[in-house]
Amino acid sequence: MAAQRSAEVLVYVGTWTQDKGEGIYIYRLDPSSGALGLIGRATEVGNPFFLAVDSRQRYLYATNTAEKVEGQPGGGVGAFSIDSKTGGLTFLNQQPARGDLPCHLSIDRTDRHALVANYGSGSVAVLPIQGDGRLGPATDAVQHEGSSVNTERQEGPHVHSITLDPASRYAFAADLGIDRVMIYELDASRGKLKRGGQPWAQVRAGAGPRHFAFHPNGRYAYVINELDNTFTAFAYDPARGSLTEIQTLSTLPGDFKETSYCADVQIYPSGRFLYGSNRGHDSIAIFAIEEATGKLTLVGHEPTQGHYPWNLAIDPTNTFLLATNQRSDVVVVFRIDPQTGRLTSTGQKAEVPKPVCANMIRRAS
């Protein structure tokens, strides 16, 4: 029984509540079958578009794509405490995100700062995390400028994610609107962002960078480009916070000619495999990562058994991958083959209204 408890995994699913959801859904993931059992909800934050958990798994933070928060225009970020026994969430407070449509956030490794990406306004902000997990007012906000070749989607900046490097020294803001991954150095003592020595990494025109992830070895990084359905691989210099492009390749089969948009990127903890979601093709693209070079080789595509897979999540035991199919209201569970990277359906799924994000923790025994 103790061994089972030590492997218990809790799943927090963020939803697009303006339609018919009820906030953050909480599930227990069965370590053997992958079954998802609903154990609770948290409804205090509307449209919890993206979720992040601190390193000690005591607090959960959720972006809120409201029109106004605490009297200020734009969205916000809500803070919750995680019950160590039940996994339930207790609302603590909420702060303005200093921008419109906050869609992504990262917690630094000291658990002192939450960095927020605001898609609508094309800006990023830093919110301090207090000792009790509550959020303080933003200590910094940076507005991006520019546009790119897609006049419908790139008329201005649209920051889709902000990701810290393994040392939490540099932050990388993938801006879909300007085809750049902006690079900032985080001043952790003041909660400020300053432009890095390399101010940005450019992707090809019209690519639309969305989500960004570091390889476990810290020497490579990958951005998934929403608009042209590609992955761009970079070599990373942690001393300078700089990115050098290695490779760009498609996430779609060569014979697919319909409309699709990429969304999320996840890297298997062994560093051997990379996964990306295709919304429209409704698949998970699976790539092998070459350890010596960081280059990608296509392994295959796995159908997500739903429509419009928004985000992906790998559970803390490295056994399962979850796909949140936003337009078909279902989270689907796949088993990961650690030798090949391929995915196999477990037959397990959970009906969740408009799921857009999943985040998991392994609860201590």
Image (cartoon, rainbow, N blue to C red):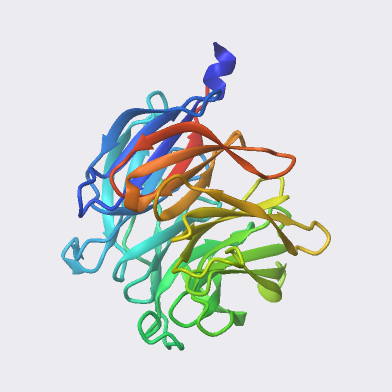
Above or below residue 341? Residue 283 is below
Where residue 166 sits: x, y (%)? 63, 57
Q: Give the residue drawn at x 65%, y 44%.
A: 342
Residue at left offset 45%, top offset 53%: 311
Asked if residue 180 shows in the view, the reply is yes
Residue 217 is left or right of residue 197, and the answer is: right
Which residue appears farthest toward the left when viewing the image?
A: 71
Residue drawn at 37 percent across, 35 percent down? 350
Residue 64 horizontal side relative to residue 70, left or right: right
In the depicted structure, whether residue 338 falls above or below residue 183: above
Q: Position of residue 267 (x, y in %)?
A: 63, 52
Looking at the image, how many numbered discs can be counted on the residues? 0
Residue closest to the far top = 1
Using the image as rendered, state which of residue 360 and residue 89 is in the foreground.
360
- Depicted 12 relative to depicted 357: above or below: above
Task: Out of 258 and 10, give the one closest to the viewer.
Answer: 258
What's the residue at 27%, 41% (across, down)?
91
Q: Can residue 132 be seen by looking at this rendering?
A: no
Q: Depth check: give the residue in front, 344 or 93.
A: 344
> Horizontally, is 272 left or right of 307 in the view?
right
Q: Position of residue 109 (x, y in %)?
A: 56, 52
Q: Tell me the quarter of the image containing the N terminus.
A: top right
Q: Nearer the viewer, residue 111 or 264?
A: 264
- Quick one: which residue is furthest to the front in this view? 255
